[in-house]
Image: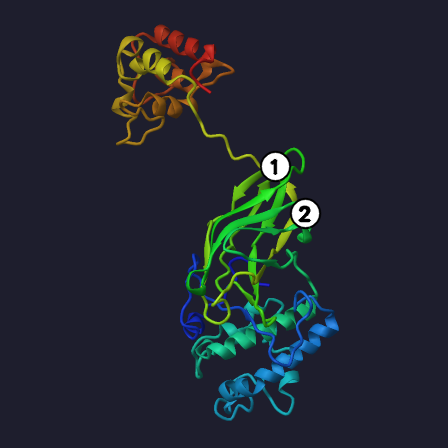
Amino acid sequence: MMTSGQKFAVVALLAGFGGVSAVSSTACSQQEDLGPGVKPAATDPLAGTEEELKAQAKELFNQLKPELVKNCGQGCHNSGVAFKSAPLFLAPPDEYTSIKAGNGMVTDDATASPLLNKGEHEGPALASFADLATKVFTWLRFEAAAKDKKILPSSAYTAIVIGPNEIDMSPAGIAGVKVRFEAAMPSGILSITKLRVFVPDLGAKKGAHMARPLFYRLRKDNKLYVDPVDTFSYVDTVFPGGVETPLPPGSAIFAVPDSWTPFQASEKIRIQVDKFEIGDVVDPPKLPSCKNAAMFNTVLMPSLTGAGVGAGINCSGCHNTGRGLNPIVVQADANATCINFTGFVNKTTPGQSRMILKAADGATTHAGGKVTDTNGFTTTWTGAITGGQIFE
């Protein structure tokens, strides 16, 4: 399967489908058209046994072989007559054996194959042939699946209706997890919005770790298609238990002609994920805050502007937004200033606060000088810090 960040660039391929509209800008078609000669599995065409997958892969190659030889052979990759240095991965009489013979064309990750990633060279890029490129990618997917037989976690197929929908992710391995969204189908184009993930209570600080949810469509003719732009490829997070959490980017549009459009109510979708397991919820870092900005403004702010016990230096003259010297005194914003000075106070040993040492301690260097009333400044700041009423 294609991992996050491993997407082959086949913009021209999508052009052959008449374009695509989705929230992701990465263009790569991943149609899984099983072909007329391949019988789909009951649920997932890639979920068969190793022997079944090998047989399907070979049949898919035989179906695309004439077109591949026509466009990539031509005395190049089948005989080397036209270009002697061209790799012979389509050598007759058995092109299938040739293309799998350790030349790097069939890869563990289908998206990494040189067949898909080779741009214009002495010959055209495969992406120039949209239909052929999608067939090659489908075949490579079966080859990769047969090689490692790694079946990724997935939901069951769920019929989609206009309005609220819910896909049960329990079959993927964590009971009770739901992916919820609103669906619309204007002009046969499936649009989903308000995407969110519900996770039941899994215990303290526990949630569902989900990586790269990938949407598949099972068409009524049993052909399987994947989200062509891998919209949620960057998702790799632990969704907390007991709540419903938005699934970024929150929406997607599936508008590739034939493979995804027209989409009709009651057609089925499933979601496959690269990873689905119970994980630890990590609390976001606590942002600094100010307990009492009004008190800071009354008790401490004057000392930063050369007034009261702060006479002798004006901190705001250097520590301002223009010069960017920390901590910054933000004019007319006591809350912001209080937050900025939080990192310069020592709540355990107030007298050792950097703020006090810099402005009032004779042994500590401070380019801005010292206040005149060092004892008064120290007492005022120490008292404010000790009281615990201003700083978090």
Distance of mark 1 from mark 2, alpha carbons?
13 Å
Count of numbered circles on the image: 2
Q: Is residue 226 visible?
A: yes
Q: Quadrant of residue 351?
A: top left
- The residue carrying mark 2 is 174
Image height of 75 relative to 262, above or below: below
Q: Give the crowd class for mark 1: few <14, some 14-19, many >=20 residues within 10 Å.
A: some
Q: Nearer the viewer, residue 200 or 313?
A: 200
Please determine whether, in this image, residue 356 is positioned above or below residue 199: above
Look at the numbered disc 1 and give the secondary structure of its residue.
loop
Residue 188 image offset from top left, x and y in percent: 45, 64
Name the spot of residue 260 as percent of width and height, x first: 50, 67
What element does badge 2 sit on?
loop
* Residue 224 percent across, percent down from the top left: 58, 68
14, above or below 37, in the image: above
User: What's the amino acid at mark 2?
Assistant: Ile
Q: Does any portion of residue 77 appear in the rendered image?
A: no
- Residue drawn at point x = 44 percent, y = 71 percent: 14
| Residue 362, numbered circle | none
Task: State whether residue 206 is above or below residue 211.
Answer: above
What residue sits right under mark 1 in the picture?
Answer: 242
Structural crowding at the residue carrying mark 2, measured as other residues with C-alpha within 10 Å and reported as few (<14), some (14–19) or many (≥20)? some
Which of marks 2 and 1 precedes in the sequence?
2
Determine the image quadrant of residue 43: bottom right
Mark 1 and 2 residues: CB-CB less than 8 Å, in contact?
Answer: no
